[in-house]
Image (cartoon, rainbow, N blue to C red):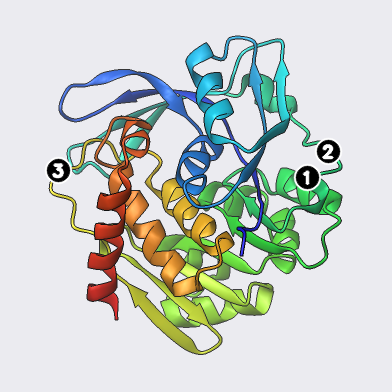
Amino acid sequence: MSARTILAVGSIAIDWLELPDGRERETLGGSATYFLLAASRFAPVHVVGIVGSDFPEAGMHLFKKHAANLDDLQVTHGKTFRWGGRYHGDWESRTTLFTELGVFETFRPALSPVNRKCDVIFLGNIQPSLQLDVLDQSENHGRVVVCDTMNLWIETTKDDLLKVLQLTDILLLNEQEASLLTGVSDLEEAVSAIQELGPSQVVVKRGSMGSFLVTGSEKTHIGAFPVKTVSDPTGAGDSFAGGFVGDLARGESIVEALMAGSAVASFCVEGFGVEGLIKIEEDELTHRINAIREKSL
C-alpha cells in the first residue's frame, strides 16, 4: 500500500543560534523545514509556506530535493522570517534574541487543487488563524489532522486555537502546555479535558523522557533513544512530529509511528540546525527504532 500524502504548513526561517559550547552561526530553520526533512523519509510531503527573496539557494535546493510538491510554497519579495536564540548551560532553556517576521507577517495560505485533497494534514507550530485557513480550504473530509501548538498561542490566541482543536484528531504538546491550555495541573486530568475539546488522541512530549499517547482512557508510554552528546536541541519537537506523522502516513500504527518520531528526533539533536536530519542513515534509524521499541513495550 502506498503512503498517504501529507500536507504540511509551518514556518520556514533563517535562524541565528548561539550554543553553550561557543558555536554561533546562521542556519536554515522553521517548523516546516524540520518537519519536511523528517517526514519525507517515510511519505510524500506537500509544503505550504512562505519565504522571501533573500532565501538562500541552498535552502531552496533542500526543499526541492525533499518535498513531493512545492506548489503552495510562496516566494515573495522581501525578507524571510528570521529568529535568533541563545541556549543556556542546560542545553534546554533558551533566550530569544530577536524575531523578525518579514514576509511571514502577511502570509495567507492558498491551497492548490491537488493540496486541497491531501490525506493527512500537519498543522505546524504557527498562528492558529493560519492553521484554520488551511483546514477551511481542505476538501478531504476523510483527512487525518495532526496539530502542534505552544504556550504563545495558548496565551494570546486561545479562541482560534480552540476552533482548530475541534477539527483536530491528534494533538501534540508538552506537559506545561497541557496544563496551560486546560487550567488543570494534574496531567491525566488535563489530557482528559483536552480530549473533550476535540482531539481523540493526545501525544504528550517529554523530551529525553520520551512521550506518551492517550487514546480514550488508555495510556501508552514511548521511550526515547539515549543521545550521548546533544549538539543542538533546535527543531527536536518538529522533527519528532515529522517522523511520527510520516510513519503514520506510511501506514504504521500510531504507537509504531511515535517510536519513529522519537528516533528521528534523536538524530536532530546530534547536529547543528538541520545537519543531523540530513545525515540520517537508514540502518541506524532502524536500529534506534528497535531500541526504543524494546524500552517501550
* Mark 2 residue type: Ser
Determine whether 222 is above or below 49 in the image. below
Q: Is residue 290 left or right of residue 200?
A: left
* Mark 3 residue type: Thr
- The spot of residue 279 in percent (x, y) is 31, 35
Q: Are marks 1 and 2 in contact (CB under 8 Å)?
A: yes
Q: Is residue 6 left or right of residue 220?
A: right
Q: Earlier in the sequence, mark 3 or mark 1?
A: 1
Helix, strand or loop under label 3: loop
Helix, strand or loop under label 2: loop
Q: Mark 2 = which residue?
A: 112
Q: Mark 1 = which residue?
A: 115
Q: Earlier in the sequence, mark 2 or mark 3?
A: 2
Closer to the camera in the image, 108 or 121: 121
User: At 56% from the left edge and 86% from the top edge, which residue is drawn?
Assistant: 216
**Quadrant of the frame with the C terminus:** bottom left
Determine whether 281 is above or below 202 in the image. above
- The spot of residue 186 in percent (x, y) is 42, 79
Q: Mark 3 = which residue?
A: 229
Residues at marks 3 and 1, CA–CA distance in whole angstroms: 39 Å
